[in-house]
Amino acid sequence: MIKVYLSNLFRFFFLILLQVLILNNIGLYNMVNPYLYVMFILLLPLETPLYLLLGLSFAMGLSIDIFSNTGGMHAAACTLMAFVRPLVLLIITPRGGYEHQPVPSLRNMGIQWFLTYSVILVLVHHLLLFQLEVFRVNEFLITFTRSILSSIFTLVLIFIAQYLTGSSKKRI
């Protein structure tokens, strides 16, 4: 159990540093922005209580906001993502329920489950984040396009990170 706490603490600080120092400087034609830090919320254990999930997600988003000077947009998007996560987990529960797999990772849950789970949550995060950034309804199509493209790029980075950090035996 202590290993789970330490790995999440390390992941929290590592993803903040990676996002702030490297990924925030990547912007392809102002349409694609990778936000790999959402992987922290995706990989929190399944049995994480809602209050802790919301608090950690808010802290992650607020940390990114502080370093990026974005005024709470990331905190709001992360908090919404954490709020929706239990519902998504309930909807995509496997037929036999969850085996004793504390971390919802690609290795533990399989590619189909993890793809569904991460696509929904990353899309929720990105849609709110980019809508808050623009805050105009008349630019919805451009905002929606940015959200989709950034979600795809973020998901590719998440899957690459999962393959690089996972063990050699993967469930597919």
Image (cartoon, helix red, strand yellow):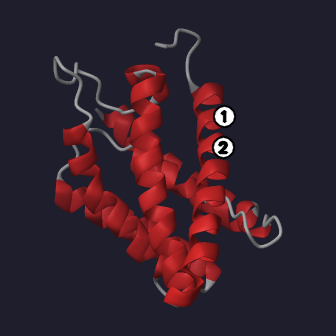
Query: How many neighbours does mark 2 have within 10 angstroms: few (below 14), some (14-19), or many (20 or more)?
Result: some
> Residue flagged by tag 1: what amino acid is it?
Ile
Locate residue 55: give its quadrant: bottom left
In the rendered structure, the answer to whether residue 141 lies left or right of residue 109 reads right
Decide: is 44 above or below 60. above
Query: How many neighbours does mark 1 have within 10 angstroms: few (below 14), some (14-19), or many (20 or more)?
Result: few
115 vs 55, nearest the viewer: 115
Quadrant the N terminus occupies: top left
**Image point (27%, 46%), residue name:** 88
In this view, the residue farthest toward the right is 29
Q: Secondary structure at mark 2?
A: helix
**Image point (17%, 51%), residue name:** 49
State yes or no: discs 1 and 2 in contact (Cβ < 8 Å).
yes
Residue with the mark numbered 1: 160
Decide: is 45 above or below 127. above
171 vs 52, nearest the viewer: 171
Residue with the mark numbered 2: 157
Residue 8 appearing in the image: no
**Image point (60%, 35%), residue name:** 159
* Mark pair 1, 2: CA separation: 5 Å
Q: Position of residue 45 (x, y in %)?
A: 30, 39
Decide: is 157 above or below 151. above
> Residue flagged by tag 2: what amino acid is it?
Leu
Q: Position of residue 44 (x, y in %)?
A: 36, 44
Q: Secondary structure at mark 1?
A: helix
**Image point (29%, 51%), residue name:** 85
In the rendered structure, the answer to whether residue 145 lies left or right of residue 86 reads right
Q: Position of residue 27 (x, y in %)?
A: 78, 67
Q: Position of residue 163 (x, y in %)?
A: 62, 26
32 vs 145, nearest the viewer: 145
Decide: is 74 above or below 13. below
